[in-house]
Image (tube, rainbow, N blue to C red):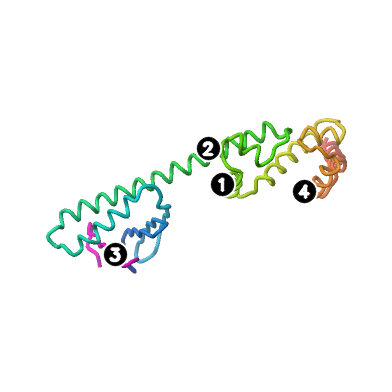
């Protein structure tokens, strides 16, 4: 049992249940893991990538060496405080990184909305935002839970549905207005996602609209 306001440092890995109420910080090779437990139950866990300068590694090494020097407890306390400050910096960095990623994702979404009729590709959009195509795909999977091409298709089809509802345009013109160069491909894709052809979708929408009047 750890008394209140006390800490245990172990250089041999994770401690199992150091106290029924405790905050544990585990420095893994790749991840910093922070766990809060109450009544021996894990109530919260945070994980942050350990990246950047090897500040944490040097502090941990110093703390391990100080374990064998009982007369250096004041120094050990200063090292622990520096280590906690380093943890705070890692957490803050992760939050800012997540915020920047979200902002970039939203900016790309707006770009697709505004340019969905253009010949967009993963490569061209990535180039427009100065990121790699692989990072662009990662961003959509991580934040949007959707692939880039799938999102682009969904956006174009949604605009096509709006045009079918509100305008008496030819199918090939609607396809072109939504970024599809091949109207036959557009019709196949539309049927795949709606189980109706564009013409059937339009007729059904207007029939339901008349029935409601």
- First-in-chain label (3 vs 2): 3
Residue occupying image coordinates x 29% and y 54%: 58
The relative height of residue 95 versus residue 23 in the rendered view (above or below) is above
Question: Quick one: SS at disc 2?
Answer: helix
Q: How much space separates mark 3 and mark 4, taking CA atoms?
A: 55 Å
Q: Are marks 4 and 1 in contact (CB under 8 Å)?
A: no
Q: Which residue is mark 4?
A: 193
Residue 86 percent across, percent down from the top left: 32, 48
Q: Which residue is mark 3?
A: 11
Q: Which residue is mark 1?
A: 143
- First-in-chain label (4 vs 2): 2
- In depth, the one of 192 and 22 nearer the eye is 192
Q: Which residue is mark 2?
A: 103
Q: Is residue 11 magenta?
A: yes
Image quadrant in which you'd find residue 126: top right
Query: Which label lies toward us, 3 or 4?
Result: 3
């Amino acid at each position: 049992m750890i008394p209140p306001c006390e800490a245990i440092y172990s250089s041999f890995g994770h401690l199992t249940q150091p106290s029924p109420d405790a905050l544990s910080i585990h420095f893994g090779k790749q991840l910093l893991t922070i766990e809060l437990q109450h009544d021996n139950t894990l109530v919260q866990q945070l994980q942050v990538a350990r990246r950047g300068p090897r500040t944490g590694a040097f502090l941990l090494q110093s703390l391990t060496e100080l374990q064998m020097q009982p007369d250096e407890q004041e120094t050990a306390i200063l090292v622990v405080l520096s280590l906690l400050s380093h943890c705070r910096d890692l957490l803050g960095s992760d939050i800012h990184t997540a915020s920047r990623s979200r902002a970039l994702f939203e900016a790309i979404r707006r770009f697709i909305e505004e340019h969905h009729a253009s010949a967009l590709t993963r490569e061209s959009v990535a180039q427009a935002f100065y990121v790699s195509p692989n990072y662009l795909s990662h961003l959509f999977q991580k934040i949007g839970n959707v692939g880039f091409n799938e999102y682009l298709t969904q956006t174009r089809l949604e605009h096509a549905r709006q045009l079918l509802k509100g305008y008496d345009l030819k199918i090939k013109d609607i396809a072109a207005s939504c970024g599809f160069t091949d109207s036959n491909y557009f019709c196949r894709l539309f049927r795949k996602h709606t189980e109706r052809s564009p013409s059937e979708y339009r007729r059904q929408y207007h029939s339901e609209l008349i029935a409601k009047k």
